[in-house]
């Protein structure tokens, strides 16, 4: 197979096998951050999220614990975790459309904080 055909074939195969969204973002207390992914019916989806510890070697403070909810396009909840520092989710898409993962931290007037979150979302 010539190089002019081989490279597009490999790229096409790679892109159709799996979609990966891996990111790092900041979240302020009292705010919500939502990320959407277009997922097809019967597509397997897995996600992993972790709060980056600002003080390596010490426990993550309560002000840095997050709440996470993953929902389908019609509002069906596929994952919910409250006051956590990390977690995982996995499901098979029951409907096609934009699935949403929302992260938030309750507003803390005593100790407002900004949290860094690593998030990896794979579907295919």
Image: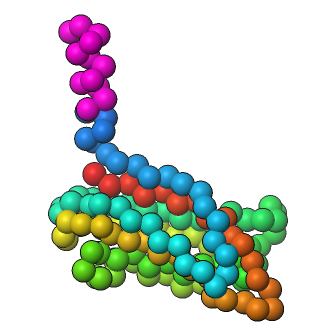
What x and y, as percent, mark residue 21? 44, 52
Q: Is residue 102 above or below residue 2?
A: below
Prevailing SS of the magenta stretch: helix
Location of residue 89 by image quarter:
bottom left
What x and y, as percent, mark residue 88? 46, 67
Residue closest to the far top: 2
* Left/right of residue 93 with respect to residue 25 in the rendered view: left
What x and y, as percent, mark residue 31? 60, 80
* Left/right of residue 107 with respect to residue 101 in the rendered view: right
What residue is at 72 percent from the left and 83 percent from the top? Answer: 62
> Is 30 or 91 nearer to us in this picture?
30
Location of residue 84 by image quarter:
bottom right
What residue is at 49 percent from the left and 52 percent from the top? Answer: 22
What residue is at 60 percent from the left and 61 percent from the top? Answer: 25
Q: Is residue 3 above or below residue 24?
A: above
Residue closest to the far bottom: 109
Location of residue 115 by image quarter:
bottom right
Q: How is the image coloured?
A: rainbow
* Left/right of residue 103 with respect to residue 52 in the rendered view: left
* Left/right of residue 50 with respect to residue 21 in the rendered view: right
In the image, the segment drawn in magenta is 1-12
Q: How many numbered discs?
A: 0
What x and y, as percent, mark residue 50? 59, 65
> Residue 16 in magenta?
no
**Quadrant where the image shows the N terminus:** top left
């Amino acid at each position: 197979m010539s190089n002019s055909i081989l490279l597009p074939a490999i790229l096409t195969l790679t892109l159709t096998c799996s979609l990966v969204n891996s990111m790092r973002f900041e979240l302020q207390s009292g705010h919500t951050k939502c990320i959407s992914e277009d997922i097809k019916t019967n597509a397997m989806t897995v996600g992993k999220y972790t709060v980056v510890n600002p003080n390596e070697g010490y426990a993550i403070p309560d002000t840095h614990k997050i709440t996470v909810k993953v929902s389908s396009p019609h509002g069906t909840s596929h994952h919910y975790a409250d006051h956590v520092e990390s977690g995982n989710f996995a499901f098979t898409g029951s409907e096609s459309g934009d699935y949403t993962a929302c992260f938030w931290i309750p507003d803390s007037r005593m100790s407002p904080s900004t949290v860094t979150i690593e998030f990896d979302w794979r579907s295919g």
